Amino acid sequence: MKVVFLGATRGMGRALSRRMAERGDELFLLGRKESDLSTSAKDLEIRSGGDASVGFHLCDLEDPSTFEAALDKAEETLSGLDAVVVTGGLFGKQEDLEQDLPLTRRILNVNFTNTILFCEHSKQRLLRRGGGTLCVFSSVAGDRGRKPVALYGASKAGLSHYLESLDHKHRADGLVTICVKPGFVKTGMTEGVDPPPFAGEPDPVAMRVLSAIDRGAPMVYAPAVWGHVMRIIRFLPRFVMRRVGF
Amino acid sequence: MTENKRRSTEPTLSGWGRLSVPGREVRSEDLAALSLNAFLFRGLGRAYGDSALPAPGQTDVATTTLGDRLLDFDPVSGVIRAEAGLSLLDLNRLFMPRGWFTPVSPGTQFVTLGGMVAADIHGKNHHRHGCFGRHVRRLRLRVPDGRVLWCSPAEEPELFWAVIGGMGLLGHILEVEFSMLPIPTPWIWCESERIRDLDEFVVALKEAGPHWPYTVGWIDCISTGSKMGRGILQRGRFAETWEAPPSDPEEKRRVSIPFELPSWALGPLSVRAFNMAYYWKHVRKKQAGLLHPDSFFYPLDAVNDWNLVYGRRGFTQYQCVLPDSAGPGAARRFLTLLTSKGGASFLCVIKDCGAQGSGLLSFPRTGISIALDIAVRDNTRQLVDDLNELVIAEGGRIYLAKDAFTRADHFRRMEPRLSEFLSIREKWDPERRIRSAQSVRIFGD
């Protein structure tokens, strides 16, 4: 599989890209920092065990003007395109975001507007090739209006909504859209936040997402336990949600 | 160190023995940034005692596990360079099928490269390949004055050999470059033998050494008298291609201990029953066959969080080496003292060590190493004191990566190299920017 990967240098993206490289997928990395990209590309090359080189190009989710050139370079290097994976995004604690509206604006822009723009670019390219897979990391935070993730969760709710629609609209054209909803996973992004019960590790998430990509499942909770947790939270009545702290 | 409290509001951190102190882990993918103002680096937290716990008055330790990228690998020479947080689990999973293995492996895969260097870990092949540090070519370090530099046996050798086995106190290890060991297959050819008593065991280990790259013994340290130190000796080597199955070993499933067992669960009776069962499970005197590498190198990794069996009070591991100069009776004197003090251990590991390496505080030296788990009870400190007195009298020493109870003066008496280590530490870290609970306990700061 020829995969363009936005966000492979860190966290769940790092774990997923490694599992892909180890099974022989061809990867092209997009990200913000050149030194980080080249180190991660080398890590993936060694893990893949083959002679394949992993290419990379700068692409910044905060700057949609970088999308076209980056995707051009990726398609050209891979000489093809079967899947686009987006794990990049921004996170901020609710208290910090409320104090810092410019930061709130950045997070809403990156997670919602710009991620969707990036998906639109990717979608067109995949459709032009007769379809493929678009796998994007949203969050369980977008499933229900909750006190501690009002702002971050809103950006992810919008993204999940878009991804679901995209899957309905283009499944028949051969484009499979996968919305990944990770629960709390211990990565650099969530560093400094006290892990709740059921906090997971990146690698089990990667394995589960990989299986969803292979099956073409439109939505996946990861780690698996978060599917059960969210099933309960989704059906809690409003008066309960108003009282509880999560 | 205090015992775990059932309800505590402040976050606590513990070593593998589950004795905890106030503390928390700070993690980042960027080890260079993480190391900038860090008091102490920590890997996967498998040191049993307080090696990777914050010094009193500090809370944060910098955990390296997110900095785990492979940076370079030469498939011809087997030289590899990686960030310090790479786990041995990951390294084995990736490279054993390709014919490479870590030159030296401890008894668990849940360790990081940085931890393997800091503790200068040894394994079943110590009599042949020495400690891990012998195979390290270069280290990238954040030294206490804030600079990042490379050290090796050629560049800053004094610093390099103090870092090897230096328990992370001379600088934060960012990258490790070392040579891997070529292996014909990932499978192990293992011969095991039931051994009747301790003296026979010491002889059997020494005899097996020249013929087998990997040797280890599990002894029953409950039985006394003529049965003292009976157990199972394992001798292994990697299987040749014509001996091994055509497929690579599959990743083993691990079971978990779902909750902490009550502290009385590992009482004298259950320990005695386990030791007896372990000995007699080996029905035939000699057995031989192919083994999954995990079953040979990492039998305890099959159970996640096995440290929970020791309950809330936790446990400590006592590991010492008794030098050959102490004579053949030293191991028996040690076990006699242990059993007379009621120091029942689940299982006890015995291993002959080869020559002392160049790591300045590296644990092994020529002799017999004995490692045993001790559930923490009211008398544990006294028991460790008594064992340490005997070890000092025999001219031996203890392993810092396992230790939680040794007194500063005891350690000084067993370690003639200590003053040299401390003067190098004084030179590189006069302000003691890097400290651990262990360094404060044993070195005074």
Image (spheres, rainbow, N blue to C red):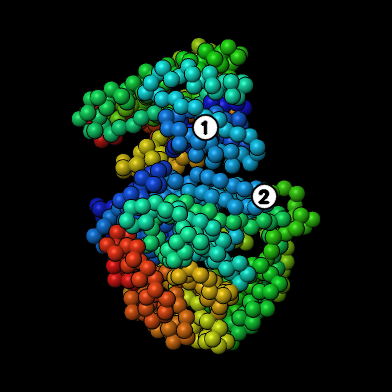
Please state which of residues B201 and B129 is positioned toward the viewer in this rendering: B129
Task: From the viewer's perspective, tell me whether residue B61 is left or right of residue A122.
Answer: left
Same chain under badges 2 and 1? The reply is no
**Residue identifier under label 1:** A209
Rendered image: mark on residue B12: none
The structure residue drawn at horizontal position 45% and vertical position 37%, both measured from the top left corner, is A36
Q: Position of residue A198 (x, y in %)?
A: 40, 42
Say above or below: B227 vs B109: below
Q: Residue furthest right?
A: B242
Question: How many numbered marks does the figure carry?
Answer: 2
Indicate the secondary structure of the residue bearing disc 1. Answer: helix
The structure residue drawn at horizontal position 61% and vertical position 39%, both measured from the top left corner, is A48
Q: Residues within 10 Å of mark 1 (few under 14, many from 20)?
A: many
Indicate the secondary structure of the residue bearing disc 2. Answer: loop
Please tell me in which quadrant of the rendered image residue A137 appears. top left
Label 2, label 1: how many angstroms apart (C-alpha)?
Answer: 34 Å
Q: Position of residue A64 (x, y in %)?
A: 40, 18
**Residue identifier under label 2:** B76
User: Does residue B149 appear in the picture of this structure?
Assistant: yes
Task: From the viewer's perspective, tell me whether residue A148 is left or right of residue B395.
Answer: left
Q: Amino acid at mark 2?
A: Val
Please tell me in which quadrant of the rendered image residue B409 appears. bottom left
Q: Amino acid at mark 1?
A: Val
Q: Chain of mark 1?
A: A
Please state which of residues B251 and B100 is positioned toward the viewer in this rendering: B100
Please tell me in which quadrant of the rendered image residue B439 appears. bottom left
Say above or below: A228 vs B329: above
